[in-house]
Image: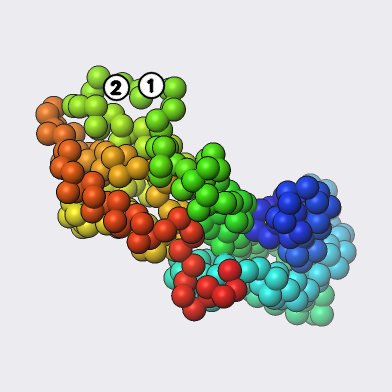
Amino acid sequence: GILAFQLTPGGWHEDNSALWAGFFNPTFFPTLLFRTVTCMVIASLAACVVINAMPGLQREDRRRLILRCAHFMVTIVLMPVFGLWFLAMIPADSRSWVMGGSITMTMFANIAIGATLLIGGYAVIGLFMQRLYINGATATLLLALAFGATAGGEFVREGVRKPFTIRKELYSNSITAKNHDDPTAKGSVAYLRKHGSVSADPYPVRNAEKYPNDQIVLGEKVFRFQCSICHTMKGANGLEHLTGAWDEDMLRKNIAKLQQLKTFMPPFSGTPTELEALVQRILWSSEGEPDTWEPTDDPAVLASIQKWLDEAGTAPGWPKSLAKSK
């Protein structure tokens, strides 16, 4: 129930004490049943591969064993029911990602659905109804297709939870989402914007001597705390690439209003000084990490950043069309 709980905490969210309400949350049963069918289908296909690899079995013996396995595979016809049930139970904003709001998630969902239909058609029509024989190569191909469909489904399941790790409780970068607008709630977005997100960070930056000034070191700390759980600077999902077309002011404004720019991102949780340090860290990296870099401390720039942060607010960036269902 933990994965379903993260997306739909259920009654646990009210006071964080109702354990069973969180465990048996709205998506618990559709998730459980969908995964059970998935496991049965994958196990059946794996068994078909093993049966074909077993020495000493006659073709007819293999056929009988494979047809036994087909009974487990037929449960795949229940997948659309459990999948639609799951889709109906997830929050509207999460559902919107799958239904076209995010082309990547929509694409992976369609790949998973298409692969499942191919496997289901072969299992139900070919194996169960026509009682055909399946050789090792075909079984291996179908098994690989099943793993691909599962991977696509898992990508979507992870994606629809954004920007949270636990919905309305914890953002994907481990910053507290609950009481986000309370500046006295330690760890909240409002608190970190007032006191700083890394002001109490006791851990030094690795290879600090390579950074040209203290501002870039601070920016690295902010990146490490707020960004590095999902992003790198130069590699996979790298900020240098994602922000490469933005100029300096655009960087400042877009990061300050991050949850409005991309609603699956958490809000920036830090002071204007920290945001400016992150901007300079990204720019320094984009310029090839030169030995010298002039720090910025223009009060007008910091005032603009503060204005943009205030305009963005501390709440998640719910799409306007879904704001009432958040």
The spot of residue 52 in percent (x, y) is 75, 55
Residue at point 73%, 64% (across, down):
27
The spot of residue 72 in percent (x, y) is 83, 65
Q: Amino acid at mark 2?
A: Ala
Q: Is residue 294 left or right of residue 259?
A: left
Find the distance from the CA under tag 1 to the CA under tag 2.
Answer: 8 Å
Q: Is residue 68 above or below residue 294?
A: below
SS at circle 2: helix
The spot of residue 182 in percent (x, y) is 52, 49
Find disc 1 in the rendering and name its residue: 204
* Residue 315 in sight from this viewpoint: yes
Find disc 2 in the rendering and name its residue: 208
Q: Is residue 160 above or below residue 244?
A: below
Marks 1 and 2 close (CB-CB < 8 Å): yes
Residue at point 30%, 51% (across, down):
306
Q: Is residue 280 left or right of residue 3?
A: left
Q: Is residue 255 above or below residue 124?
A: above
- Within 10 Å of disc 2 (Cα), the crowding (few <14, some 14-19, many 20+) is few
